[in-house]
Image: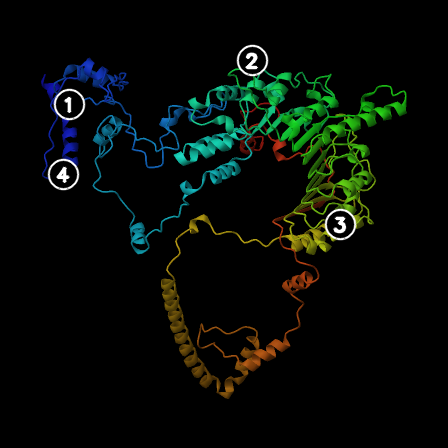
């Protein structure tokens, strides 16, 4: 029994020592009376609200401590039970600051990227109302509770009397206290400004990182909650099937039971047919009808498929998924019926994409025109057509050429009628279609402001120039990519035909129609001739022209010179990107590149000055203090200069007396001639020599006339042309690289785990543990 009592005394001594150190001087810390922790007291605790909480998890007890506890209960100090927990390591949650809310209060705001898109929690506090402080379950403590593991460590290690602080940091703090950093008042920004900021910071929403960033931003404070969720739900990222199906479930709920009305936040829907719409999730297809009818502010609906993307070689493959009839029924809405049942108003779309492979076999262009006349499509401003081919292209045996030509013209006319049925159309995009030819260009409406032609083979420069002259005077954005028969001959009329053009984007890269047959060469002789001098509209802001090839060096120089000559008439130009290929000797190509790349950058590139770093955001100092500091610095500098001048004058007088001796005249003259080009320094008074102004002038006259400096050459060159200097970026590339469908880079030749390649050692042949050959 004596050994047990001695061990208990050894156990209590460190605790008493720790209590004596923690208590102030002269104050005796009362010891808690030993009590017995019964199962009833440790199992359940009375909640301040009257509820009974579940028993908290018991801490792990080692074998030695449990044996000691079984031996003696009376000597152990019992801890009084608290309503929160007994013997747990859970830390107290601090009181939330004003304007902020706890993450735990909105625990279901997290987005499981692999499961759902449900961000709602009806039980959380509304962000418009002040967040209620959580009810404390225990009296607040001035100091946090020390965990048991830390207490055990404190028993073994002696407590330090003070914390070491470097003397240098203390001195620096006393002399120059740290200035407080300026943090913008984000909470004072309006709601719509925060929405725009979050949309810009998270764009594009096509990966999990952007979605996770928006969710983390929504949990920062109450002010950021709704703007961040608005930016997320404006075009909800449907990355997986569970996310799409859970979005339908969320939107189908009554808005009065959710934190926000998520239905009015969704404005755009982009659905991947291959991954989302064509496949089932838990045995159910995506309910498009419920999804569409739940979105009263839906404006853009886009169904896409990866087969429609470059290199455009699988356009003939059929798709199992087609536009369902329930989709058009939901878009057109239902009229109100008798009784208490209200109708569903039609969805007024502004953007839509027609894909020929997603249409039913019996659905033709006449039905598309009839749909364009209904309320759901009548207000379309952006329209896209993909994979619309003329009938003669798919005819196996064209027996009568005239009949095939008549069918093609009828098809083109039906296509033009479907487009003309939209009075508010401003954006037209046609991809991978042979229906775009001379006849269709002549029928396009004049209201189009943005025209995109992608991978259209029947577009030629002469017909396109005629279209620009007749119907292109309202064009503002022109995008021409991967058109095999279209060269740059239309640039000679571009300035006259499109006076309002702001963006010109041309990519002359082509793709093979067959995977194992090379047929991607352009269908024109020259991309631009010497006689075709481009005329640029004065309203241009962006010029991007890529993969220009099949022209002579003279034609390329005429093209570059037209940009330099038009610089005074392009005040709005801000971005210039040119990539050209020249099949000429490399020395000539290098000379042209060095000449025109430097000249175009000198003419158009803006001379930018880097902004001040973020840590310079400090309050403006007092101007009177600055003036006083500058005056004191000038006074010290003047005093130093006066002292130096006096000492120099004294040394020069002494040296003048020394060199007045005739015996030293020859040596002084020699030193004067040797040191005529460099000013003397007063390092050693015995060797210092004064140089007169006459000697300096004679030395300057004796110097040979040097060639003009590079700075003078640049000034003379800049005076020969107009200096635009308003472009944020000027990218000029000139080489002989043939455009390929895929450009191989270093990452393509490394293993899946790139770190293994970087850590591999070179083969030396002296390793005995490796058998066989090196390869």
Q: Is residue 544 above or below residue 275?
A: below
Q: Which mark is residue 394?
A: none
Observer-side mark, 4 or 3, equals 3
* Residue identified by numbered label 4: 24
Q: Position of residue 520 (x, y in %)?
A: 77, 32
First along the sequence among labels 4 and 1: 4
Observer-side mark, 4 or 2, equals 2
Q: Position of residue 484 (x, y in %)?
A: 78, 34
First along the sequence among labels 3 and 2: 2
Q: Which mark is residue 535?
A: 3
Q: Quick check: marks 1 and 2 in contact, CB under 8 Å?
A: no
Q: Is residue 418 left or right of residue 392?
A: left
Q: Name the residue located 15 percent from the left edge and 15 percent from the top edge.
A: 71
Q: Name the residue located 44 percent from the left edge and 24 percent from the top edge.
A: 120
Where the N terminus falls, by quadrant? top left
In the picture as drawn, the residue positioned furthest to the front comes out as 338
Q: Is residue 334 left or right of residue 126?
A: right
Secondary structure under tag 4 reads loop
Secondary structure under tag 3 reads loop
The one of 358 and 554 positioned closer to us in this rendering = 358
Quadrant position of residue 29: top left
Q: Determine crowd level at label 1: few under 14, some 14-19, many 20+ residues with C-alpha closer than 10 A.
A: some
């Amino acid at each position: 029994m004596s050994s047990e009592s001695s061990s208990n005394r050894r156990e209590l001594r460190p605790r008493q020592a720790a209590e004596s150190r923690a208590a102030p001087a002269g104050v005796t810390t009362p010891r808690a009376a030993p009590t017995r922790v019964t199962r009833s007291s440790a199992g359940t605790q009375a909640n301040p609200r009257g509820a009974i909480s579940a028993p908290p998890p018991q801490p792990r007890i080692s074998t030695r401590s449990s044996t000691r506890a079984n031996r003696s209960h009376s000597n152990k100090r019992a801890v009084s039970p608290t309503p929160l927990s007994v013997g747990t390591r859970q830390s107290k949650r601090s009181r939330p600051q004003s304007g902020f809310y706890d993450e735990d209060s909105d625990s279901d705001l997290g987005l499981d990227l692999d499961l759902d898109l449900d961000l709602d929690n009806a039980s959380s506090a509304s962000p418009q109302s002040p967040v209620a402080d959580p009810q404390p379950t225990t009296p607040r403590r001035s100091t946090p509770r020390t965990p048991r593991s830390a207490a055990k460590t404190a028993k073994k290690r002696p407590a330090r009397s003070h914390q070491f602080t470097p003397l240098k940091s203390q001195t620096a703090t006393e002399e120059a206290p740290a200035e407080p950093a300026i943090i913008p008042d984000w909470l004072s920004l309006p709601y719509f400004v925060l929405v725009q900021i979050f949309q810009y910071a998270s764009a594009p929403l096509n990966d999990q990182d952007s979605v996770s960033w928006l969710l983390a931003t929504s949990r920062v404070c109450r002010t950021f909650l709704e703007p961040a969720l608005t930016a997320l739900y404006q075009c909800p990222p449907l990355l997986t099937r569970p996310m799409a199906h859970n979005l339908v479930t969320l939107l189908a709920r009554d808005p009065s039971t959710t934190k926000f009305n998520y239905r009015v936040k969704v404005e755009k829907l982009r659905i991947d047919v291959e991954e989302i719409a064509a496949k089932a999730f838990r045995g159910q297809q995506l309910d498009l009808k419920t999804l569409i009818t739940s979105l009263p502010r839906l404006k853009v609906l886009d169904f896409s498929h990866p087969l429609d993307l470059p290199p455009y070689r699988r356009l003939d493959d059929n798709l199992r998924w087609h536009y369902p009839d329930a989709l058009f029924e939901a878009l057109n809405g239902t009229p109100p019926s008798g009784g208490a049942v209200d109708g569903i108003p039609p969805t007024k779309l502004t953007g839509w994409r027609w894909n020929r492979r997603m249409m039913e076999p019996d659905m033709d262009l006449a039905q598309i025109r009839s749909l364009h006349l209904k309320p759901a499509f009548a207000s379309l401003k952006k329209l896209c057509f993909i994979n619309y081919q003329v009938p003669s292209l798919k005819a196996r045996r064209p027996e009568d050429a005239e009949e095939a030509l008549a069918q093609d013209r009828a098809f083109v006319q039906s296509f033009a009628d479907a487009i003309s049925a939209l009075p508010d159309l401003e954006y037209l995009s046609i991809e991978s279609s042979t229906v775009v030819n001379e006849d269709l260009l002549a029928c396009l409406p004049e209201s189009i402001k943005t025209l995109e032609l992608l991978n259209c083979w029947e577009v030629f420069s002469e017909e396109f120039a005629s279209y620009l002259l007749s119907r292109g005077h309202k064009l503002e954005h022109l995008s021409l990519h991967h058109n095999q028969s279209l060269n740059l001959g239309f640039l000679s009329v571009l300035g006259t035909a499109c006076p309002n053009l702001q963006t010109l984007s041309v990519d002359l890269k082509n793709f093979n129609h067959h995977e194992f047959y090379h047929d991607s060469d352009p269908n024109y002789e020259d991309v631009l001739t010497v006689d075709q001098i481009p005329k640029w509209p004065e309203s241009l802001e962006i010029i991007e022209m890529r993969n220009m090839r099949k022209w002579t060096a003279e034609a390329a120089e005429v093209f570059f010179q037209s940009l330099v000559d038009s610089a005074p008439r392009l005040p709005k130009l801000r971005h210039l990107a040119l990539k050209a290929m020249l099949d000429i000797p490399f020395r000539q190509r290098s000379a042209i590149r060095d000449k025109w790349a430097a000249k175009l950058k000198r003419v158009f590139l803006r001379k930018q000055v880097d902004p001040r770093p973020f840590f310079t955001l400090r309050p403006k100092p007092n101007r009177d203090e600055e003036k006083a500091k500058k005056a004191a610095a000038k006074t010290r500098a003047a005093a130093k200069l006066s002292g130096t001048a006096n000492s120099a004058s004294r040394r020069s007088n002494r040296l003048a007396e020394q060199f007045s001796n005739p015996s030293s005249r020859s040596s002084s003259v020699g030193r004067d001639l040797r040191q005529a080009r460099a000013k003397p320094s007063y390092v050693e008074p015995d060797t210092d020599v004064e140089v007169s102004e006459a000697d300096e002038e004679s030395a300057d006259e004796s110097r040979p006339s040097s060639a003009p400096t590079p700075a003078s050459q640049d000034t003379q060159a800049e005076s020969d042309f107009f200096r635009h200097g308003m472009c944020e970026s000027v990218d000029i590339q000139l080489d002989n690289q043939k455009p390929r469908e895929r450009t191989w880079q270093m990452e393509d030749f490394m293993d899946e785990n790139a770190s293994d390649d970087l850590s591999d050692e070179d083969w030396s042949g002296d390793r005995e543990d490796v058998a066989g050959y090196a390869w």
